[in-house]
């Protein structure tokens, strides 16, 4: 039987008569068996199942089942839940087929447009349709359940609430909840978690008469802001261009940090929602703070939020509400790109350059690229927003495929920060900071400002060493050092999460002279707190963010504007708006400048620009301080001379000269196994197959060890495919994929990564 892709046209047709996301039934229906020998029109349904197999499976059913419906079928002695993707008359098939055991949905839960998008994604990324399709469903649906939808209750602050806010000083949870609710206007109970509202605090506020329930049977979809902003000239041009957009078109909103991209999204969405459409807003994982979400929720009464920090039930509720057309704006991370939206009219991808849009394991898709494809299939506009656009996107602008809408300045009196490059060659440093830098930080604090210190390394120190014999604390499962942590104390491998106590003596020579090497955010926190005893130092990194509650408290504390130092990783660099920050510090820019990945300059320039962009966002002008041993490095010189935009265009031209992506298409075959020799032989076989098949335009390199050659006890190898033209790459990959499918099941895991964003 041919691959599932051949069936998508038929799948579309068969499903067209069914309204996606419509009425549902709970009872499972036993499917009529097809009686043997009777001339009853039995059908063959093709079902996507939760297995890594690339193909779908055929089953027999006594009645046609529309694509997008879930069914229960036998598979290798188990009963599993799958999704029908195609239906054909049975007589086309020779050979016996097993029968569908039960039909779960009377009507499809995945509408035709989402099915088509998923089928495209499975084909483009050369991943099994089963995992792609089942992975797009919230977990309870994937397991065959159909949760009852709860009716959300809406609450809002009462008329006295604003005046009562100062009286809540001794009830911080209630004060926070009330403050957020005042920002939002009102909030539905199913959005409490997503928007950081604590239900217990709300109940306490209700008891005080500060919060009341409202009947929001039909809320006005768009809530006009209390004090609408006057758009800047660039914002107005961008809003007008988006208003004029009809049908598919991809628009890069290239706005310098703090230029007000969000306001442009909000205006574009307002139009769409007022006209009865739905908007999908994709945001990166980390930037997802309730503050950012609140801006959407405050403007659109029917906003739903979905991300991995929420419980399954909440994510399912958002998905079902979106599918039923009960939300106007769906804000979500990566996987929201596959959510059903029957009236979808606009897609926004905020911070489109962010690597978190690319799934890094299993089904390795780019949510940004899938979003563009979805917009094309639905014939609606898509907006990609960033201060530091990816090279892929800039390349598409250069080729005239995407339109560019620039926002060149910050609104009001805010200006872009000045870049100060500090040459730290031969300078004495403490946690990477010179005496001059510490003095600069002190001066800002004394003037009542905030300072942001960026370091892309969490923990206390990236290594622990013996001063006597040179022993280093290595992870026993990875080719990597253990990171020293103080809170809680211990050694942690950041690659496999192995933990070990800090040894009292060197395990190699027995001396008690172990010392940390290098510095992470915990060490910076310690040094800064010691240097500026009168000021708060707040740390932000993944360890802090393990508790959303704690992260949020710290972000709110930072937003209050009291003079303090914010120390943190990427988490701090992304999208936040801290009006009181006047100095952003990049303690050590060198690590990124000399990484072996050809994308390192792009990444480094993005990080520097994003960190810099946190400074001077309001009335107070900002400075960015960049400490480096290589002040004459071309990336730094380019940023200094013309900012990210000029750097990127020059670097893009360089990539063209050597034929690297985005001027070429690339893919990685990634393989790993406990046995290094086995991994080597399998990957070498695949590389050879790729070479034998590849047309002249395709280059095949490897297998070579991955930059992290061993992780969690598995040896990791990769083969790199590079092609001048995408169709040639995909032909070669299809060939390799067939070889991968034919590999004996077992010890070597192999995956295909199309358009890899990193080679780690
Ligand atoms: P970014 O482009 O970095 O995403 P934001 O959308 O966060 O910028 O906007 C930065 C700040 O500027 C926000 O506080 C926002 O409310 C404010 N802002 C945006 N547009 C305007 C405007 N036209 N006039 C005044 N303030 C604005
Ligand atoms: Zn030793
Ligand atoms: Zn490890």
Image: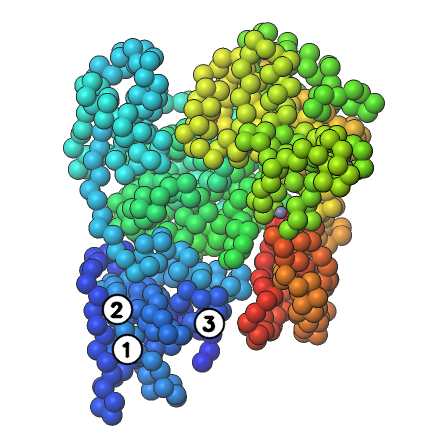
Circles 3 and 2: CB atoms closer than 8 Å: no
Q: Residues within 10 Å of mark 1 (few under 14, many from 20)?
A: many
Report, in whole angstroms, how far the alpha carbon at label 1 lies from the one at label 3. 19 Å
**At 58% from the left edge and 64% from the top edge, which residue is drawn?**
749
Please say if 433 is above or below 697.
above
What number is the disc on residue 596?
A: none
Instruction: Estimate the x, y position of residue 279 in percent, counting from the top left.
Output: 37, 43
What number is the disc on residue 61?
A: 1
Instruction: Estimate the x, y position of residue 318 in percent, counting from the top left.
Output: 31, 45
Decide which of tag 1 and tag 2 comes sooner along the chain.
1
Q: Which quadrant of the figure has residue 164?
A: top left
Please say if 413 is above or below 393.
above
Residue sitting nearer the eye, 394 or 699? 699
Q: Secondary structure at mark 3?
A: loop
Decide which of tag 3 and tag 2 comes sooner along the chain.
3
Q: Secondary structure at mark 2?
A: strand
């Amino acid at each position: 039987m041919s691959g599932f892709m051949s069936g998508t046209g038929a799948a579309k047709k068969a499903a067209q008569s069914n309204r996606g996301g419509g009425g549902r039934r709970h009872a499972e229906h036993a499917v009529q068996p097809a009686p043997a020998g009777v001339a009853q029109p039995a059908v063959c349904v093709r079902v996507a199942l939760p297995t890594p197999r690339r193909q779908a499976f055929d089953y027999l059913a006594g009645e046609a089942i529309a694509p997008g419906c879930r069914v229960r079928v036998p598979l290798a002695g188990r009963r599993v839940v799958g999704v029908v993707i195609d239906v054909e008359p049975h007589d086309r098939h020779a050979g016996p087929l097993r029968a569908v055991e039960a039909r779960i949905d009377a009507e499809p839960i995945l509408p035709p447009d989402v099915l088509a998008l998923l089928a495209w994604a499975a084909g483009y990324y050369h991943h099994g349709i089963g995992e792609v399709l089942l992975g797009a469903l919230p977990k309870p649906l994937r397991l065959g359940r159909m949760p009852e939808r709860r009716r959300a209750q809406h609450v809002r602050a009462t008329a006295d609430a604003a005046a009562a806010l100062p009286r809540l000083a001794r009830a911080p949870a209630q004060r926070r909840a009330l403050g957020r609710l005042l920002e939002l206007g009102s909030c539905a109970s199913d959005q409490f978690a997503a928007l950081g509202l604590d239900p217990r605090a709300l109940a306490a506020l209700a008891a005080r008469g500060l919060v009341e329930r409202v009947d929001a049977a039909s809320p006005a979809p768009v809530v006009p802001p209390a004090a609408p902003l006057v758009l800047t000239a660039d914002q107005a041009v961008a809003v007008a261009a988006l208003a004029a957009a009809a049908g598919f078109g991809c628009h890069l909103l290239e706005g310098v940090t703090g230029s007000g991209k969000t306001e442009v999204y909000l205006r574009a969405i307002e139009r769409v929602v007022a006209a009865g459409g739905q908007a999908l807003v994709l945001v990166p994982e980390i930037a997802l703070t309730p503050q950012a979400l609140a801006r959407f929720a405050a403007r659109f009464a029917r906003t739903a939020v979905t991300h991995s920090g929420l419980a399954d039930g909440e994510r399912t509720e958002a998905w079902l509400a979106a599918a039923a057309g009960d939300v106007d704006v769906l804000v979500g991370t990566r996987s929201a790109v596959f959510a059903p939206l029957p009236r979808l009219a606009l897609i926004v991808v905020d911070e489109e350059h962010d690597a978190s849009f690319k799934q890094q394991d299993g089904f390795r898709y780019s949510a940004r690229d899938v979003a563009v494809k979805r917009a094309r299939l639905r014939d609606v506009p898509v907006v990609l927003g960033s201060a530091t656009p990816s090279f892929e996107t800039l390349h598409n602008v250069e080729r005239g495929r995407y339109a560019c809408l620039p926002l060149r300045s910050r609104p009001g009196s805010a200006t872009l920060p000045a870049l100060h490059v500090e040459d730290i060659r031969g300078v004495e440093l403490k946690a990477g900071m010179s005496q001059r830098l510490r003095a600069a930080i002190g001066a800002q604090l004394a003037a009542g400002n905030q300072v942001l210190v960026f370091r892309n390394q969490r923990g206390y120190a990236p290594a622990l060493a013996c001063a006597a014999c040179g022993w280093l604390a290595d992870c026993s499962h990875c080719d990597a050092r253990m990171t020293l942590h103080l809170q809680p104390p211990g050694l942690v491998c950041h690659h496999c999460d192995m933990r070990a106590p800090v040894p009292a003596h060197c395990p190699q020579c027995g001396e008690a002279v172990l010392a940390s090497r290098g510095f992470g955010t915990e060490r910076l926190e310690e040094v800064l707190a010691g240097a500026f005893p009168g000021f708060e130092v707040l740390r932000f990194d993944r360890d802090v963010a393990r508790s959303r509650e704690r992260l949020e408290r710290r972000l709110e504390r930072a937003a209050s504007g009291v003079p303090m130092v914010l120390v943190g990783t990427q988490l701090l660099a992304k999208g936040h708006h801290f009006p009181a920050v006047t100095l952003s510090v990049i303690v050590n820019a060198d690590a990124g400048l000399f990484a072996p990945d050809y994308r390192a300059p792009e990444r480094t320039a993005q990080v520097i620009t994003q960190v810099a962009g946190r400074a001077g966002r309001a009335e107070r002008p900002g400075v960015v301080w960049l400490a480096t041993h290589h002040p004459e490095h071309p990336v730094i010189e380019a940023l200094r001379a013309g900012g990210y935009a000029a750097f990127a265009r020059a670097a893009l031209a360089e990539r063209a000269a050597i034929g690297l992506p985005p001027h070429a298409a690339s893919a990685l075959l990634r393989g790993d196994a406990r046995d290094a020799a086995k991994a080597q032989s399998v990957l070498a076989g695949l590389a050879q197959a790729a070479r034998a098949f590849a047309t002249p335009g395709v280059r095949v390199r490897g297998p070579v060890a991955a930059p992290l050659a061993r992780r969690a006890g598995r040896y990791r190898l990769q083969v790199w495919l590079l092609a001048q033209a995408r169709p040639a790459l995909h032909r070669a990959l299809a060939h390799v994929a067939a070889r991968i499918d034919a590999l004996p099941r077992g010890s070597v895991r192999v995956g295909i990564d199309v358009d890899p964003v990193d080679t780690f």
